[in-house]
Image (cartoon, helix red, strand yellow):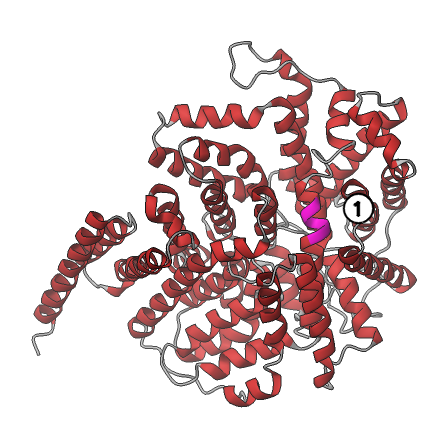
Amino acid sequence: MTELSDREAELVSAHEQERPARQLGGPLRLGVWIVGGLLSVYSLVVVFRPVEALEHRMTFLAVALPLVFLCYRSGWSSSVARLFRRGAAASPPPETPAEDDPLAGVSRAVAHPEGTRRSERPTVADWLLAAASLAVLVYPLLDIDGFRNRGSGAALTDLDIVAGLALTVLLLEAVRRTVGWSLTIICVIFLIYAYYGAYLPIDWTIGHRGFDLGQIVSQLYTGTEGFFGVPMQVAASYIILFTIYGAVLDYSGASKFFIDLSFAAFRKSRAAPGRTVTTAGFLLGTVSGSGVATTVSLGSVAWPVLRRAGYPKEPAGGILAAGGIGAILSPPTLGAAAFIIAEYLRVSYLEVLLYATIPTLLYYLGIFLAIEIDSRRFSTHAVQVDAPKAGKLLLRFGYHFSSLILIIVLMALDRSAFQSVVIATAIAFALSFLDPRHRMGLKRTGQALAKGTLEVLPVTAVCAAAGIIVGVITQTGLGLNLSAIIVDFAAGNLVLTTVMSGIAVMLLGLAVPVTASFIIAAVIIGPALTTLGVTQAEAYMFVFYYAVLSEVSPPTALSAVAAAAITGGNTYKTMMMTWRYTLPAFLVPFAFVLTPNGQALLGQGPIATVLLMTAVSAVAVAALALATGGMSGWPERVLAAIAAVLLLFLEPVPIVAGLAVLAVAGAVHLVRSRRRDPA
């Protein structure tokens, strides 16, 4: 398994939006692992023996929420100082990870070896909060049918209301502990809006009749519109299964194989080190769903190689961050928000993977072209790395790819995503016995199961709390009202609406995690785009990409900041280099929203159209690479940028014009180059 060193773990916890867990020890740590492992087993069993939706989500949260209070520090002693800081930027650094700890190497929780430092114990308040969480979630399970009927009939008892209010407070505290104050404050604002909306001026579009506590609790607590809505369904089904799968892959040695294979595959050309890092980031994305964690774990191995190859600190950091963020942009796992897209659109997860395939290819094409250009600009050179040959690695450990391929094959054969990933997990487990160093015995299997649950705890808290936002928006009609405001402000212009939407999603992503920013934007901004004729798939994918890209967007750019910390480069310059490497990912989403042929980039339409539009978009990405570094003079750079924009319109006339402008840019570049170097 790929372990993080003390320094790497500290970097992850410092720059990841999710906070590090407290360091448990002794019987309590063992107990948490056992409970976490049992929750993973329950999640696997439910795939083949389904449980009614509300009951399943309540049961899952009844185990996960108490674990949050036991595993995550309250942080109240320094919370005032952190109130307006983002994510975990001010979180106390974690300690040394234990080799046998399922939390070792995980951005959310890094445990330390016994004896290096006294373990942290939950306080009395933590135990009380955990007990209260269990009580308010087990209570409705004792008579789930009666509880559901009371909610649908608006006949809640006083105990129902008290339990619902208690769960609301507990979820707000859980979110504060795991991802910080920003999302907590947003949830509180929505609750205040639901209760006091009737006091808003009558001529305000967002005003409503107001709801009392009983009505709010009924909406959030007794059905599948609030805490136990689609986000919670995704956490309790998709995400937990994929984190278990990632943990099994990790413990079976896949992470080491992916890194070794990447270094073995590109070892001769001057651009090989940069391409190696990017490829390794893509492969590691199947194990880690975190851009920051992938950046740091990749950087620990790749930065020395990039430095030896001659890369300056900032470009090297940009490559690391761009490769890391690819972990949550790329099939077959993508990020948590992609699972929510599948639920919102009521399509298979395989279809969402198909939506993401061409944009992913264009994303990596842009990175590879930029790396090729920079290898010449910085006069980098090949680096000899002590790694087995690629062919030998594939023959010996290539079986690690089999479970990844199997997921796609099973979904193509109409197996559900849930069953596909469980079967793939079983295959990865079985294949681990081919490697004596990583065979999944009882201990490693238990650790992997525990890691699967413990990794999903922050996401579970976020998804349950996001139910507050979704529930209030649904109850008050706020989503449609805000969408109308956006459309009216843009005067019904699709281009202006799309630009405003992209900016809004990125700004939202600066404050809250990717999953939460996607959920909020999907229910508010999504309808604004669909009102103007954009399909739901195009709208949701646009929101998805901009939610993810907030991790590489100044002024915070978490992945870029983490990369700069590794290389020792200037943080702002590293952010800008990352932005340059990821530029295609910022522009391509506009193509599939603003142009009629844009749906081809999501794999929709006749195959000939899909192939043609993909080829044109690839030329546009190449033009962007030339505009941002492949040409030395500003006239040709401006022309290349104009050509890229024209090509991304994906219509015959703009395409021809774009190709012509690109040809002119090339001609200008050749003429200017000959004048500078007559020989």
Q: Among all residues in the image, which is located at the extreme top?
A: 202
Is 234 colored magenta in this rendering?
yes
In terms of secondary structure, what is the magenta stretch mainly? helix
Q: What residue is at 57 percent from the left and 72 percent from the top?
A: 300
Which is more toward the observer, 250 or 357? Answer: 357
Quadrant assignment for the C terminus: bottom left
Side (left or right) of 145 relative to 514: right
Residue 346 percent location from the top left of the image: 59, 44
Q: Which residue is mark 1?
A: 56
Q: Is residue 260 above or below residue 334?
A: below
Q: Is residue 457 above or below residue 293?
A: above
Side (left or right) of 43 relative to 479: right
Is 222 colored magenta in this rendering?
no
Q: Is residue 78 above or below residue 151?
A: below
Which is more toward the observer, 277 or 464? Answer: 464
The segment highlighted magenta reads: 233-237
Quadrant assignment for the N terminus: bottom right
Q: Is residue 649 above or below residue 120?
A: above
Q: In which quadrant of the rendered view does residue 115 lie?
A: bottom right
Q: Number of numbered discs present? A: 1
Residue 669 percent location from the top left of the image: 15, 64
Tag 1: amino acid? His
**Does residue 663 appear in the picture of this structure?**
yes
**Does residue 178 appear in the picture of this structure?**
no
What secondary structure is found at the residue carrying circle 1? helix
Residue 293 percent location from the top left of the image: 60, 62
Q: What residue is at 73 percent from the left and 31 percent from the top?
A: 220
